[in-house]
Image (spheres, rainbow, N blue to C red):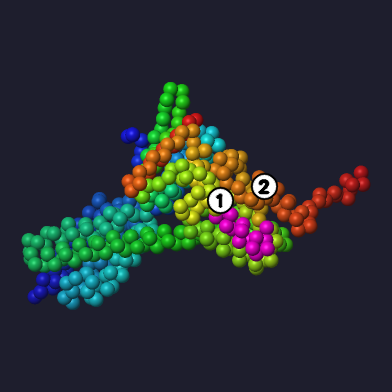
């Protein structure tokens, strides 16, 4: 998938920047306050996962206009170790680190569309979409 | 006569023209013409730089690090610092030195060795202004970071044994550690029973923020204080439900509600005072 704007996620400052940009985009697209908060929070979870577990990566922000519908798609990508068991990773309370283990599953529940592809040793790609 | 001494002599001989041309270049190309610095002030800086440069050259200094240039380096550091604070760009700041290079290039016709020695020195001084500029900016940023950390973590005493901690901004930085320690210390110092953590000013509550809150609540509890979380806006509430976060603590929509509850818990109440005259009517 090409198009959209690519942003680096290399430090926790970048996580803050991604959050701010996602909020600005969602506002510009006319998302309601609840929808803004949902996609910003999901972006925050995934950006931090990219940084903490993927060793840094990128996010692509894509504005979608599909007829009458508008939406925002975020594609997070890293070249980290990958996720051995994606089912397990999505289960609430599971973490391979020291977090609450709610981020990935939470991000799925906060989005309308969710796609997780991971290859061991190659990296992880998570794509979420929130429609207005 | 060494190259540096020749350079010093050439600078002294052509001083009037050099300064005039140097000033002209700075006004047209550098930050001199932007009005942030008066031409009189710029002139003083140019005079002083040339005088110090000549003095160093006369003492045979060949590199910018030479002790003979110590005063010159101090001057450049102060100049870069003040320009950094005044909002000059790095290019405008360094053009103070690099525009002089353009002027002294003409000395090449008179003495190649001297012009080359001068050229190398000016390059080094130019880089030095860059470094000083950078350092001054970094100091400003570091100071602002410290200020933000201190400013945004006040613990407020609302009543005997009731504390409030209004959180503002991003919580997933090192700031959280400061916030938490600050609160726990205040619980001890003020012998607090109830701490109200107000998150009205936190734009995003994700699982990391929730985890920080949970840890703070647990630590406060170990010290004998109960926490109340207030300022949960509707959109935050909905998002937290989707995330599956359970704070496992009493929460209130507003700080006022949380305060009322805290007062009840410590056995206090707020009553309306009825004026005596109206009470009699």
- Above/below status of A118 relative to B114: above
Return the mark for residue B252: 2
Pick the residue in front: B207 or B182: B207
- Which element type, helix, strand or loop, lies under badge 1? helix
The residue that mark 1 highlights is B210
Instruction: Decide: few, some or many residues near mark 1? Use Cα within 10 Å; few <14, some 14-19, many ≥20.
Output: some
Q: Is residue B20 visible?
A: no
Tell me if residue B225 is in the magenta stretch: yes
**Which chain does the residue under circle 1 lie in?**
B
- Above/below status of A105 relative to A29: below
Pick the residue in front: B72 or B151: B151
Residue positioned most to the right: B280
Q: How would you classify the magenta stretch by its main secondary structure?
A: helix
- Magenta range is B212-226
Instruction: Decide: few, some or many residues near mark 2? Use Cα within 10 Å; few <14, some 14-19, many ≥20.
Output: some
Identity of the residue drawn at 13% across and 59% down: B105
Tell me if residue B154 is in the magenta stretch: no
Residue B86, percent from left and from top = 38, 57
Which comes sooner in the sequence, label 2 or label 1? Answer: 1
């Amino acid at each position: 998938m090409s198009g959209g704007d690519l942003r680096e996620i290399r430090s926790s400052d970048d996580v803050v920047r991604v959050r701010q940009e996602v909020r600005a985009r969602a506002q510009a697209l006319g998302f309601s306050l609840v929808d803004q908060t949902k996609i910003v929070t999901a972006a925050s979870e995934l950006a931090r996962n990219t940084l903490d577990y993927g060793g840094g990566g990128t996010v692509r922000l894509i504005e979608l206009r599909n007829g009458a519908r508008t939406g925002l798609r975020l594609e997070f990508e890293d070249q980290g170790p990958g996720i051995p068991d994606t089912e397990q990773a999505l289960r609430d309370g599971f973490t391979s680190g020291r977090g609450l283990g709610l981020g990935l599953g939470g991000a799925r529940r906060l989005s309308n569309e969710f796609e997780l592809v991971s290859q061991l040793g190659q990296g992880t790609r998570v794509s979420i979409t929130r429609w207005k | 006569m060494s190259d540096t001494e020749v350079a010093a002599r050439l600078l002294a001989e052509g001083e009037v023209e050099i300064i005039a041309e140097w000033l002209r270049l700075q006004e047209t190309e550098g930050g001199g013409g932007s009005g942030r610095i008066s031409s009189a002030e710029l002139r003083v800086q140019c005079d002083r730089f040339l005088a110090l440069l000549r003095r160093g050259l006369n003492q045979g200094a060949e590199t910018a690090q030479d002790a003979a240039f110590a005063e010159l380096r101090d001057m450049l550091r102060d100049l870069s610092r003040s320009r950094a604070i005044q909002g000059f760009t790095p290019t405008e700041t360094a053009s103070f030195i690099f525009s002089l290079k353009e002027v002294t290039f003409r000395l090449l016709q008179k003495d190649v060795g001297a012009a080359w020695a001068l050229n190398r020195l000016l390059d080094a001084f130019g880089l030095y202004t860059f470094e000083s500029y950078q350092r001054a900016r970094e100091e400003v940023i570091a100071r602002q970071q410290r200020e933000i950390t201190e400013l945004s973590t006040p613990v407020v005493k609302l009543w005997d044994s009731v504390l409030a901690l209004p959180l503002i901004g991003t919580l997933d930085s090192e700031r959280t550690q400061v916030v938490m320690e600050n609160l726990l210390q205040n619980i001890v110092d003020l012998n607090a029973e109830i701490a109200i953590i107000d998150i009205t000013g936190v734009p995003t509550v994700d699982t990391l923020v929730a985890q920080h809150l949970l840890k703070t609540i647990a630590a406060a509890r170990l010290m004998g204080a109960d926490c109340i979380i207030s300022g949960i806006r509707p959109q935050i509430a909905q998002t937290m439900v989707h995330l599956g976060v359970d704070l496992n603590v009493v929460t209130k929509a507003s700080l006022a509600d949380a305060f009322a509850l805290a007062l009840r818990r410590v056995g206090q109440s707020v009553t309306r005072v009825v004026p005596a005259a109206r009470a009699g009517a």
